[in-house]
Amino acid sequence: MKSNLFSLLGDHPAHGSDPLVHDLHRTLCKDEVLERVDRLSKQLTNPAGTTVAVVAEGIDMLVGMFAVWKNNQVFVPVNPRNPRPDIDFAAVVSSAGVEQGDNDTRHEPGVAFVLWTSGTTGQPKPVLHTHESYLEIIDRVLGPLRSKPRDPDKDPSPNLIPVSLALNAGFYNALFGLRAGAPLVMMDRFSTADFATLVSRHSIRSTVLPPAAMAMLNDDPALESLSPLRYVRSITAPLSPFHARRFNERFGVIVLNGYGQAEIGEVIGWTAADAKQHPDKIGAVGRPHPGVQIRVDSAEGSSVGELLVLPPSRADGYADGSDLSDRITDDGYVRTGDLARIDAEGFVWIEGRLSEMINRGGNKVYPTEVEEVLLSIPGIREAAVVAVPDDRLGELPVAFVAGDANRDLEAVCREHLIPYKVPARFEWVEQLPRNDAGKVLRRELAGSCDV
């Protein structure tokens, strides 16, 4: 095998007695983490290439992950708060110990892990990544940062991971931190008070947050500051410019979007230099990372179309035996299923999912545009616009909103949108249904109403 992600732990530059992993209540040095990994790996007697599910959180998930890789087995992260994926495993690691399974199916050498797609518009799919491809996915973002001179007498800032390692975003950012030679700060579950405590305790200046977590921090009246935090990258779900501005105004923290998918990793993002030079572009997902090529497949006369990406590497396929061939163009680009436009400076603006675009009698309605108007109304916490069938026009937009507003929602939409983009109906809900990554489950909303 050419590479193994276990090296990110085994070859980490920290000395054995140096603190390597923290959570709210404990700190483990590098030797302690390696000892726990070694002890667990000896209990995993299944052959190389077989799948091992790790049902855990925080440091325990991290230890399980590296134990699996030490044995050249295939890691499957499972959030203990969610139902276990409907596949068989060679072994399952949990707080109860190691449970042997009966699935001895072996993946090809080099396969590192299985992660599920978000499943916001369809059923989640299990994505296979190799050790080699995922190292490239990390290095395509880390490479430009490494080119900057670093003070050898200054330790790298810890990487705070405020989401579950069962999510692609948590998994990626933990490995990214280790690849950068940094220690990790883990959160088993997100809470605003714990997040603020860890930011202060470990002098975190830059981290990642899902939009739902930013909303929780915004809405917590007990929080006076998130100092010394300066930058937050939005992860797991689209972030509206409205919520980015709101977070910045409340805490003085610059919020940057990014873009990626489970199959291709992060392909578009921001640099600190871009953030300083282009404050008017906040709301875009950034510009392509080095080595990534992109284009938009749009109809003649339109600047918006499906985003196509040619990354240096991508997932091998899916654990169900299918591959990505139906998403690959003749010249090798991956069809993302996302609608986007690219401006004159090369910044990419995501307009929504192709499958979520609403065709109202031949007129195209992009839900994100309508949602941005709704979110600008004081008192509206959440908004999602979905398509429902209509016998005359084919589809109609219906808006689901959460919050407490005293404004006429239809009147506000008519002030800011052309008539065919105004929702046909407004439904009030306590909160929007979301998956564990914080993405709105639009299929549930669409299935809950008829016009």
Image: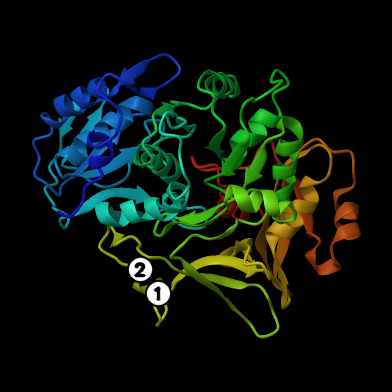
* Contact? badges 2 and 1 (CB < 8 Å): yes
Q: Is residue 209 above or below residue 293?
A: above
Q: Which residue is mark 2?
A: 324
Horizontal side of residue 5 vs 266, given as left or right: left
Query: Of all residues shown, which one is farthest toward the bottom?
Result: 300
Query: Is 336 situated above or below 230?
Result: below
Front position in the image: 106 or 358 = 106
Which sits in the foreground, 286 or 323?
286
Which quadrant would residue 172 be assigned to in this image? top left
Indicate left or right for 326 with 401 as reference.
left
Name the side, left or right, on which 307 lies relative to 277.
Answer: left
Residue closest to the eye, 348 or 189: 348
Q: Is residue 284 visible?
A: yes
Question: Is 335 drawn above or below residue 278 in the view shown?
Answer: below
Alpha carbon distance from label 2 to label 1: 7 Å
The kind of secondary structure element at disc 1 is: loop
Res. 137 image quadrant: bottom left
Residue 140 image position (x, y, % from top left): 41, 56
Q: Amino acid at mark 1?
A: Ile
Q: Position of residue 343 (x, y in %)?
A: 67, 69
Label 2 element class: loop
Residue 17 coordinates in the image, percent (x, y)? 27, 18
| x 81%, y 68%: residue | 420
The residue that mark 1 highlights is 328
Q: Which amino acid lies under the numbered mark 2 shown in the image of this protein? A: Leu
Residue drawn at the location 79% of the way across and 49% of the way down: 374
Residue located 59% across and 22% down the image? 196
Q: Where does the C terminus fall, quadrant-wise?
A: bottom right
